[in-house]
Amino acid sequence: MTFGDFSSVLKSFGGSSANEEIQDELYKEVLMVTLAQASNADANIHPLEIETIQQIMRRETGLDLTGADIRKASLSDMYEAANFRKYLRRVRGKLNAENKAAILQALVDVIKSDTIINVLEIDFINRVADALRMTPAEQLGLTA
């Protein structure tokens, strides 16, 4: 998957059934975009957040993103706050509970990486969990 190539997302909106490959690509895209947006949630993109995102993306997806890739996604007009929530609401039904929990846990890891957590970052996490329509148990990574 090339950065910024949201073909999987577009396919999933086209009415095609979400097979495992499409779901996996969608998970990668949502994870990357969500983490990039998190790095800019407080309008301060900290180098430790960028490093953490790179590590998570490499571990979870095998993708090696550059700092420029992450900054580009974090500052994209396509993902302004309202548009980003709308984007998450549109894809939430295509993600399974494990994907949603992994995205939220990775998000927490990014927010904690610079050791300073502020109200804007907490608000961002809450908005992501709400847009993904996650239950408290799912937010804690508990699925049956």
Image (tube, helix red, strand yellow):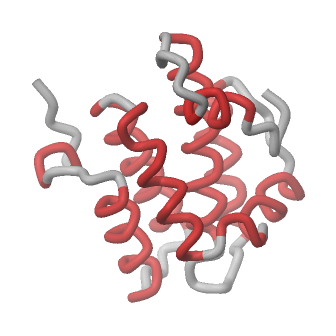
Which residue does the image show at 63% across and 68% down from the upper left? 39
**Where's residue 79, x and y in %?**
66, 66
Q: How many marks?
A: 0
**Where's residue 125, x and y in %?**
38, 67
Which residue does the image show at 57% across and 12% down from the upper left? 21
Which residue does the image show at 49% across and 11% down from the upper left? 19
Q: Is residue 134 above or below residue 74?
A: above
Left or right, 19 with reference to 42: left
- Based on the displayed image, in which of its 4 quarters is residue 97 positioned? top left
The quadrant the C terminus occupies is top left
**Where's residue 115, x and y in %?**
48, 74
**Where's residue 81, x and y in %?**
56, 76
Which residue does the image show at 79% across and 34% down from the upper left? 64
Residue 56 vs residue 127, the one in the foreground: 127
Residue 137 vs residue 81, the one in the foreground: 81
**Residue at the top extreme?**
20
Left or right, 122 with reference to 47: left
The quadrant the N terminus occupies is top right
- Based on the displayed image, in which of its 4 quarters is residue 5 positioned? top right
